[in-house]
Image (tube, grey):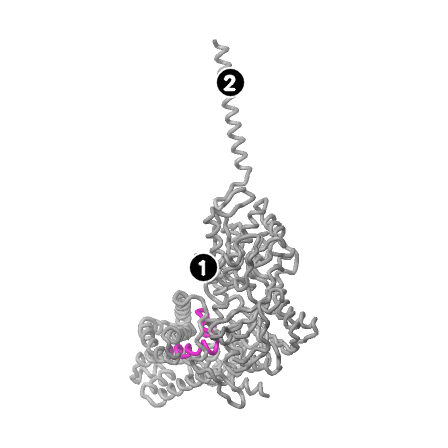
Amino acid sequence: MELLAYAVVGGILYGIFFTLVGLGLNLLFGVMRIINLAHGQFIVLGGYLAWIITTRLGFNPLWSIPVSVLCAIVIGWPLYRAVVPRLQRSDDPEMLSFILFFGIGQMLTAVTMLLFGADQRSLPEDALGSGSLGVLGQQFPDSWWWAAGVSLAALALLWLYFSRTRLGYATRAVMAERDEAVATGIDVRRVSTIAFVAGLALAGIAGVFVPYLLGSVSPDLGDGLTTTAFAIVIIGSLGNPLGTIVGGLVFGLGTMLMQTYYSSWSNVVPYALLLIIVLIRPSGLLGKAVRLA
Amino acid sequence: MQAKRTRKTFTASLKTVAAALACATASFAAHGAPATPSEIKIGTLFASSGPFAVASLGQYEGLKFWAAQVNKDGGAFIKAYNKKIPVKIVAYDDQSSTATATTLYNQLITQDKVDVLVSDFGSVLTSVAVPLAAEHKMLLIDPTGSGANFFTQKTDYLADVSIPSSTVWPIPLANFLLQQKIKRVAIVYDANDFDASQAETMKAELTKGGVAPVFYKSVPTTESNYNVLLHTAKASNPQALLEFGYPPNDIAFLRSLSQSGLHFDMTFTIFPGQLLDLLKKNVGVKSLAYTYTYPTPPLVKYDKVTYGMNTADFVSAFNTSEKKQPNFLDASGYNTGIVVQKMLEDSPNFTQKDFHQALMDMSDKTTTLLGLFKINENGAQLGQPFPVAQLVPNAKGDDLSVNVVYPEDHATAKPVFPAPKQ
C-alpha cells in the first residue's frame, strides 16, 4: 500500500512536470497547426542553459527560467519570421512543419554536440534544496516539488493569459477557428508570434528540470523528449492546452505504476497509451468525440 | 669471316633471349609474391553522439593514441612481411545506432578492405559486427563487447581483447557478498545482454552459495528515473542493492538514490570504476561515498607486463600526449592496439585465420596494462578479472579513494560495512 501511495504521488508530480514538457508543443499546434519536432531539442537547450548558469556562473538554476524566456524571444521571433509565414502559405502546413522542424531538431542536436560535447551534464543536487518533502507519509526530493511547482505556475500564467487578457481571448479564437478570427479582424500574426515564442519559452523552462528528473542532460535526449511530449499531447488532445494536463498526468501515473509493478515495461507506457487512445478516442481524452469513417 | 659474323649474331641472339627470359622470370616472381602494403588499415567505428558516445570516444582515443605511438616508431612489425609498416586507422561515426553501425562495418570490410576490424564500444554496437565478421571470414577484434551470447560457440572470427566476458564480471563480487555473509540482496538490471548476463551470473553464484535475491527486477536500458524503483527495492529490506546498468543508468540511479533519502548498507554500480571522473562530475563525491564498484586500470595498476607499456607508463604517456588523465576506456582502446600489434608481430602469414591463431598462441602467456590476456576458443576473454572496490571519501569529504576490498590478495583496505549514512 505504501508503494502504491508512493507511485501515485510520484506519478502526479512527474506527470505535472511532463505537462510542462508537452505544453509548448500543443500551444504551437493549437495556434498555428505546426508540429514542432524540434521541441525536445529546445528543452535540451533549456537544460544546457541551466547547466551554464549553475555550474559556470554559480547562480541558482531557477535563474535560468527568466533567461530561457529571454532566449526564447531572441531566438523565437526571428525563427518565426523566417519559417512560419512560409509554412502557412503551404497547402499542407502540418506535413511541411513536420519535415522542417525535424531538420531544425537534428541541426540543433548537432550544434549542441559541437558546443557541449557528447558528455552528460548534470546539476548539483543541492542547488534546488538537498532535503525532501513528504505527502501521505512518502518523501519526495525537493527538485521534484520545484519542477511540479514551476510547472503549475506556468500553467496558471497560461490560464490567466487565456482567460483574462484580450490577446488571450484572441489566441483562443485563433485556436478555435482561424479563418473566422481573421475575418473578425484579429491580428493573427501577432497572436501566432506570441504563441510561438511562448511555446519555445515553455520548452526552455521545462529543460531546467530535466537534469533533475531525468538524471542529466545530453545532446541526444531531444528526440526522446519530443516523442514523449507528442504522446502526451495526443493522449490529452492535440490543440487543446487543457488536454495536455490530462495527458501529462496519465503519462506520469502510468509510468510510475508500471515501474512499481512491471518495471521493465515502464518505457512502453507512452506508446501503449498513445496507441490505445488513437484506437479508442482519436481526438484525445479531452478532444471532441469524432468517428473515424 | 661470314662464319665469325654468324657466331657473333647467334651469341647476341642467345644473350637477348636469356635477358628476356630473366626479365620474364623476374616479372613472374614479382607477381607471384604478395605485395607488401604501404600501410596496415585498422578499421573501426566510434560514436560521437548517442548513449554510448562518452565510452566510445574514450576507446577510440585510446586506439588512436596507440597508432600514433606505433607510427612514431616507424610502424608495427609485421612478421608476414618481415618489416615495420605504418598503421592507419580508418574510422566512421555510427552515432550509437546499430543500423548505422551495420552499414559502416559492411563498408569497412567490403569497400575499404581493412586488414584488421575493430568493433565499437560495448555489447550493443558490437552485436551487429559479430555475424557480419563471421560471414566475411574476418576476425573481429572486440575491445569491450562482452555480452554472453557472443561467445556461445567455437569461432575463428571473434576475439574479446580488453574486457572480460560479462558473464565472469560479477563472480568476485558474488564471492565478496558471500564472504561478508550478506543474505539479503536486491538486484536491478537493464534489459540488455551486457547487464542481464551479469544479473544472471550474480543470481546463479549467490544461489550456489545458498542466497536467493530478495528483489530481482529489470528496467529498460533507457531508464532515467529510479525513484519509485528504489522504494520498491527498499520494501524488500535488502542489505545490499546492486545496480547493473550503462553509465547513464548509473548516473540516474545514484542521483535518484541520493535524492530519495533512502539508505542501503551496501550499494554497487558498475561504471564508477571505469569512469570515475564522469561519475564524480555528475553524481558528486557525497553520493558516491562508500558505494562499491569494479575498479579497472588505471585505478588498479599492472606493473609487470610482457608486452606494451605498463599501466603507470601508459597513464604518464597518455597524459603527456593528450593533456588529460586516461580512464579505463582510453586504456582499453590502447590495449586493443597493443594486442593487435602483438598479433601482427607473431602471425607468420597475413591472413585472418593466422591472426586468430596468433591470438590463441598469445593467450595465457601475455600480460598487458589491463592484466593477463586469456581467451577461450569461443573468443571470450577470461583474464583480467575485476576486483571489488569501495569508494571512500577523504577526510575533507571532497574526493574519493578507491579501496580494493576483494579478493584478499589484491585488497588495499577492509570494507566499511554497513555504509555510514551521508
Residue B11 marker: 2
Residue B319 marker: 1
| Residue in the foreground of this view, choosing between B9 and B301 | B301
Pointer 1: residues within 10 angstroms few (<14), some, or many (20+)?
few
Residue B23 part of the magenta segment: no
Pointer 2: residues within 10 angstroms few (<14), some, or many (20+)?
few
Q: Which amino acid lies under the numbered mark 1 shown in the image of this protein?
A: Asn
Q: Chain of mark 1?
A: B
| Residue in the foreground of this view, choosing between B260 and A147 | B260
Secondary structure beneath disc 2? Answer: helix
| Residue in the foreground of this view, choosing between B306 and A137 | B306
Residue A216 part of the magenta segment: yes
Spot occupied by residue A77 in the image (x, y as percentages of width and height): 31, 75
| Residue placed furthest toward the top | B1
- The kind of secondary structure the magenta stretch mainly shows is helix
Q: Chain of mark 2?
A: B
Tell me the CA gap for discs 2 and 1. Answer: 71 Å
Residue B420, picture quadrant = bottom right
Spot occupied by residue A148 in the image (x, y as percentages of width and height): 45, 84
Which segment is the magenta one?
A199-225
Q: Is residue B197 visible?
A: no
Spot occupied by residue B196 in the image (x, y as percentages of width and height): 61, 69
